[in-house]
Amino acid sequence: MLARRIIPCLDVKDGRTVKGVNFEGLTDVGDPVALGARYADEGADELVYLDISASREGRGTFTRLVGRVADAVNIPFTVGGGIATADDAAALLDAGADKVTVNSAAVSSPALISEIARRYGSQFVVVAIDARRCDDGEIRVTTHGGSRLTSRLLFDWAREAQERGAGEILFTSMDHDGTRSGYPCDLYARLASSLSIPVIASGGAGGPADIAEVLTAGRADAALAASIFHYGEITVAELKNYLHSRNIPVRL
């Protein structure tokens, strides 16, 4: 079994790491370069930086930040947030990012996935999918931070994203995100079995046991987390030692 990856996620606004709920009530939790370097030292396998700045000026700040992260961090990192064109992705990859993640723009224009993959390669493209279960039992894809429901179905969209060139799927269940009550492992297992590319689990972890469960029963290849690391509830090293003690393969 391949080693499972632990990936801290940093939301960035105007050059600072912030944390909130649905991008509201944001609090400053530190310098993104320093935090990223700390997580790398603790044994993180990768990092994800998401730009939540609304302004064009904020985008410029984020691109410069990517360059600083590339200079300071010795592990792969993915960047996303507001990527609407292949040129947007190019600016961030050229600044030093290892991968980009696309979400809402890819749902409205799926050719974006193909264009980035054709230009750089599938290994550079992570497609983030936010989805929730509807009254009819179907699991539908949402956009714009989960605020807009679409007609696309989770498993169909994930397979299409793979076919268009996605190298990984980052799936967040909007029904579980922020609840700290664990992941819907049945959904992750079904998603993993229907794809040939890695699946990253995001949203719902209340502690290390939840992450262990999604990496085993949920068959996820990696787990993304933010608050538990930012607020010092557990370090990356402590989490990996916990997983290792339960015979889950991780890089120590």
Image (cartoon, rainbow, N blue to C red):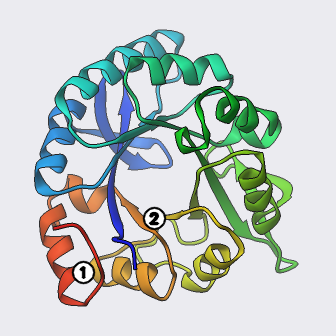
Q: Residue at x 42, y 65 (%)?
A: 222
Q: Residue at x 67, y 26 (%)?
A: 84
Q: Earlier in the sequence, mark 1 or mark 2?
A: 2
Label 1: state its secondary structure.
Answer: helix
Q: CA distance from mark 1 to mark 2?
A: 22 Å
Label 1, residues with CA under 10 Å away: few <14, some 14-19, many ≥20: many
Q: Which mark is residue 178?
A: 2
Residue 70 to residue 161: above or below? above
List x then y, in percent, for residue 142: 72, 53
**Quarter of the figure that contains the C terminus:** bottom left
List x then y, in percent, for residue 60: 44, 11
Q: Is residue 50 left or right of residue 68?
A: right
Q: What residue is shown with label 1?
A: 243
**Quarter of the figure that contains the N terminus:** bottom left
Residue 246 to residue 4: above or below? below
Q: Are marks 1 and 2 in contact (CB under 8 Å)?
A: no
Q: Residue at x 80, y 55 (%)?
A: 160
